[in-house]
Image: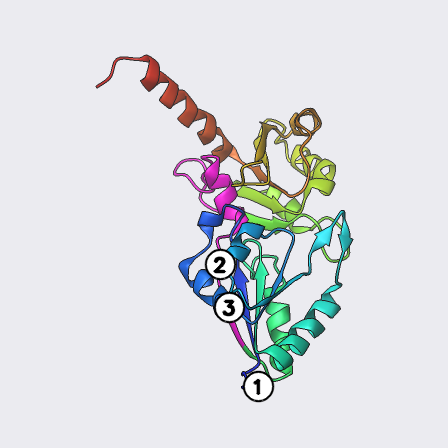
Amino acid sequence: MKFKTPKLTVVGAGPGDIDLITVKAIKVLKTADVVLYDALVNEELLGFVNPKAELIFVGKRRGCYIYQQEQINELIVARAKTHGHVVRLKGGDPFVFGRGAEEMEYAASFGLETAVVPGISSSLAVAAFQNIPLTKRGSSESFWVITGTTKEHKISSDIELAAKSNATVVVLMGMRKLPQIVQLFQAEGKRNLPVAIIQNGTRVNEKVGIGTVDTIEKIVIENELRNPAIIVLGDVVKHRQAILEVQLQYENGPKR
């Protein structure tokens, strides 16, 4: 059997729509000997994988972990040493709350070659698919991307800081902390700030709820919104409705 250099490539699979994976990522999947993939990865993307490669699901099902992170790290090293090229396929971008950096450090400590292929982050693309820009002249000069839940399972203290700013705030993994997020923005006098919650963003089963800081919890219940979802808070959320109104006016009005 020909010896293969043990290698790990951490690959971003994008936010869900299979067309939003990069060309480079597809090229890497075709060279994989083993692919470890997460629950947020669209499984249609596995059609791009080398047909001889071993596929291993390492995500969560029904809220339960198939593998703990330490086990995934060990599996990466073990498979790389026995099979060669391991591709760790992750939803979104592996360096945006994806733990890709941790896995690369662990692999490198065992002598594996490491590489990364960036992916399109859900923090950007999911909002964009709903015509919500994260920055817009006159509305938002910057944006925060924050995890809603820290490794201690607490709300991130950065959300309180972000609530004090005029920036757009994007919260990932924050649905279980939504009541606390709402309270922080209410405390800053931002009860009427527009909010969007987008579940399964860019996928065919995408669901959207639009409201304000004061109304969003009720809208979540009415629309049965749940994880995986992102929360977008800021005046830029108004752009979505503005575009719809302009399109409607064009369709109903005299054509230029």
Q: What amino acid is at disc 3? A: Val
Query: Foreground: 234 or 92?
Result: 92
Which residue corresponds to mark 1? Answer: 1
The crowd level at tag 3 (other Cα within 10 Å; few <14, some 14-19, many 20+) is many
Compared with residue 15, is residue 100 higher up or lower down, i.e. above or below?
Answer: below
The crowd level at tag 2 (other Cα within 10 Å; few <14, some 14-19, many 20+) is some
Residue 224 quadrant: top right
For the residue labelled by badge 1, is the local secondary structure a helix, a strand or a loop?
Answer: loop
What segment carries the magenta color?
Answer: 114-142
Q: What amino acid is at disc 2? A: Phe
Query: Foreground: 245 or 111?
Result: 111
* Image quadrant where one finds the C terminus: top left
For the residue labelled by badge 2, is the local secondary structure a helix, a strand or a loop?
Answer: helix
List x then y, in percent, for residue 54. Answer: 61, 67
Whether tag 3 and tag 2 are in contact, CB under 8 A, the answer is: no
List x then y, in percent, for residue 81. Answer: 63, 81
Compared with residue 153, is residue 208 higher up or lower down, i.e. above or below?
Answer: above
**Nearest-to-viewer mark from 3 and 2:** 2
Residue drawn where x is 53% and y is 64% of the image = 51
Residue drawn where x is 48% and y is 29% of the image = 238
Which residue corresponds to mark 2? Answer: 48
Compared with residue 82, is residue 246 higher up or lower down, i.e. above or below?
Answer: above
Please give the label number shown on residue 116.
3
User: Sequence-wise, which precedes: disc 3 or disc 2?
Assistant: 2
Please give the label number shown on residue 95.
none
